[in-house]
Image (cartoon, grey):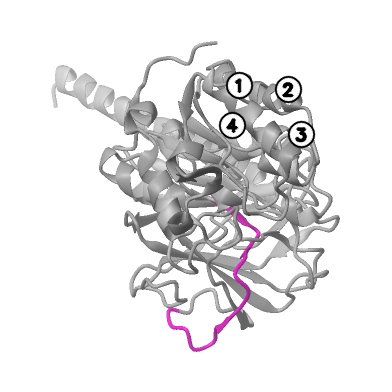
Amino acid sequence: MTRHHGFALLGALVAMVALVCGVIIAGYGLLDSGSRADTRGSGADDGSADPRTRGRTPVGTAAPASADSWTGTWAAAPVGAEPGAPVGYPGRSIRNVVHTSIGGTSVRITLSNLYSPAPLLIGGASVAVGEGGGGPEAVAGTMRQLTFGHRASVTVAPGGQIVSDPVALRVPYDSDLLVTLHTPRAGGPVTYHRHALQTSYLADGDRTRDLDAAAYTPSRRVWRYLTAVDVLNREARGAVVAFGDSITDGVGSGYDANRRWPDVLAARLRDQHIGVLNEGIGGNRVLSDASSQRNGASGLDRFQRDVLDRAGAEVVVIDLGINDILRGRETDPARITAGLRELSQRAKARGLRVIGSTLTPFGAHRGYNATTESVRDRVNEEIRSGRVFDEVVDFDKAVRDPYAPDRIRPVYDSGDGLHPSDAGYRVMGRYLSLRLVEDRAPAQL
């Protein structure tokens, strides 16, 4: 071997040693960063998050780099502690059935323990595409186990909430999803949504992986613990949040049918890949918390949590104020419109477009009298003037009886003189101009 060849061989050996060392060092770095990620994730299991935190902070490190690609496809506001369930459902599985507005390629959920003074242990959770019709059966091949900080179980702090790790699942548009939670031991009161108009199901033991309905029995038409479902959808153009009371919640509509006015709007926006989130609460008010925990915190109090913190929120439709008149006995319309104006300003400060609704008629309702009608009329006058919201949808005009403007048109009345029927909700959902929703002009502050 010549000297020249010897030096060449030696150089090659040195280069190889350097490469191997580099790989080893990089490997240690990866192990170290993975160890740190595991440490961050493990904190999710002890319920140590500050229960006062309002934001939807994901647990663990599995969120994609393009976080703004997450868009809400379904939501429901927590309204209070479920009556008759002071310690939850120990040893049982809860299967919530929810309906998507848009689809995606991955999914994550938010669980809330807002109305409990005790920690909530979730022993396991899953998500699957439902067979449809509101039943508890899952489509074969779609069952996915959910994790929280890469762990199968998680403890949600008293008053807190938690977001699952994302999981790959092809979520269809306009379809049922089954979100199942196993609660192995007694906890505190169940945080729930009262007027789900959707049957939920219960089963004994851990049935989070069950595809069929054999173990499940129908339960009340409520949603338990679940407050949001987000999807990863590269075509999504954001979400519209419907923020209101029982008329937004859909009271008076048919069960297991998805015929609320936000559902009608969602069908119109599907081709535009815009999600619709229903944050209505029956009995909710703008100015004050309801006297019962079943009707949620005031609109002013919950606006951050239920609107501004929702994934992909671009537009909010506000239809709130009737219960301030009928239940809160508010006789000063200026106080109601001031509260609505504050909601509008807070949304616009975050870049959301705001559409406000007039208050619909209640002339055939037991709460109607000359005073309550006068307050409603004056609130509507201020809303129509443009001094409360930048854009207005006149739901009052859409459903009122042209021969008795203080009443809902009979064909649109569910029967109590206050809540629309399916036909009334269909008119409302179609009355809202899509131009107002799709317009991407900056919010005017």
Q: Nearer the viewer, residue 126 or 431?
A: 431
At 53% from the left and 67% from the top, the residue drawn is 198
Point out the image quarter for the N terminus.
Answer: top left
Which amino acid type corresponds to the residue marked 4 in the rendered image?
Leu
Q: Secondary structure at mark 4?
A: helix
192 relative to 315 in the view: left or right: right
**In the drawing, what numbered circle is on residue 382?**
1
Q: Nearer the viewer, residue 64 or 418?
A: 418
Query: Distance between the Cα atoms at labels 2 and 4?
Result: 25 Å
Outermost residue, front side: 403
**In the drawing, what numbered circle is on residue 334?**
2
Residue that badge 3 annotates: 287
Q: Earlier in the sequence, mark 3 or mark 4?
A: 3
Indicate the position of residue 77 as horizontal and vertical percent values: 63, 49
Which amino acid type corresponds to the residue marked 3 in the rendered image?
Leu
At 45% from the left and 76% from the top, the residue drawn is 135
Which amino acid type corresponds to the residue marked 1 in the rendered image?
Glu
